[in-house]
Amino acid sequence: MASGDARVAQIASSIRVIPDFPKPGIMFQDITTLLLDPKAFRDTIDLFVERYKDKGITVVAGVEARGFIFGPPIALAIGAKFVPLRKPKKLPGAVIAEEYSLEYGTDKIEMHVGAVDANDRALVVDDLIATGGTLCAAVNLLERVGAKVVECACVIELHELKGRDRLGDRPVFVLVKAD
C-alpha cells in the first residue's frame, strides 16, 4: 500500500461504504463516489501510473466491470494496450476462457484469442480484491497464453477475506485496505 502518500487518505475518504448491500452483513465499497471526485480519481490513476510506468508492462488487463474504469487510463499513460477480461458470451469471435469457483457454483472470464501473447508483460487491474477468485482466474488466463503477469493492482483490498492467500506468491498492490 502507498500508505505514506497523502493522496491515499483522500482516495480512501472518497470511497463510500454502504452497510448491508447487496445483502445483510456486507459492507459494500462504493467506488462511484471516488469517480465523482476528480482529484481522488486522478490521484488513483496517478499512483498506479507512477508505480508501473517503468516496469516494461505491455498489456493492462482489466477485469469486468470496474477494471474497465481504471485499466484504460493506466494503459494509455504507460503506453500499453488494454485488454478487457469479460464475462461469458460478451466478446464476439474466438475467445479463451478461465473458469473459477464462487461460493455457490462457478463463473468464467474470457478474452479474445490473440489479444495477449507470450511476449507480453501484463498488469491485471480491478477495483477490489476480496476472496481473490476473479484475480486468480485472470492471472491463470494470461499465464495460459504465456504472458508474464507482473502484478495485480486494485484500489481496495478487503483484507479479512484473504484474497492474497488464493493468489499465492503472485504480487498484489492495493491503495486502500478496508476493514
Image (cartoon, helix red, strand yellow):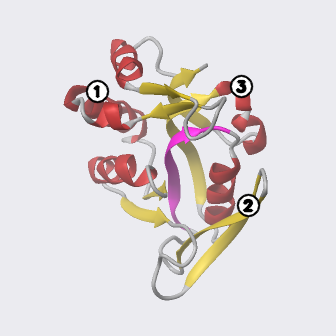
The percent position of residue 99, horizontal first and vertical second, equals: 72, 67
* Type of secondary structure dominating the magenta stretch: strand
CA–CA distance in space, label 1 to label 3: 25 Å
- Mark 3 sits on what residue? 160
- Mark 1 sits on what residue? 40
What's under tag 3, amino acid-wise?
Glu
The percent position of residue 21, horizontal first and vertical second, equals: 55, 36
Badge 3, how many Cα within 10 Å: few under 14, some, many 20+? few
- Mark 2 sits on what residue? 100
Which of the two labelled residues, at mark 1 and mark 3, occupies the earlier sequence position?
Answer: 1
Q: Residue at x 57, y 44 (%)?
A: 151
The percent position of residue 50, horizontal first and vertical second, equals: 35, 33
Q: Is residue 164 left or right of residue 86?
A: right
Q: Which residues are magenta?
A: 119-130
Q: Residue at x 36, y 49 (%)?
A: 69
* Corner quadrant of residue 109: bottom right
Label 3 secondary element: helix
The percent position of residue 156, horizontal first and vertical second, equals: 51, 31
Badge 2, how many Cα within 10 Å: few under 14, some, many 20+? some
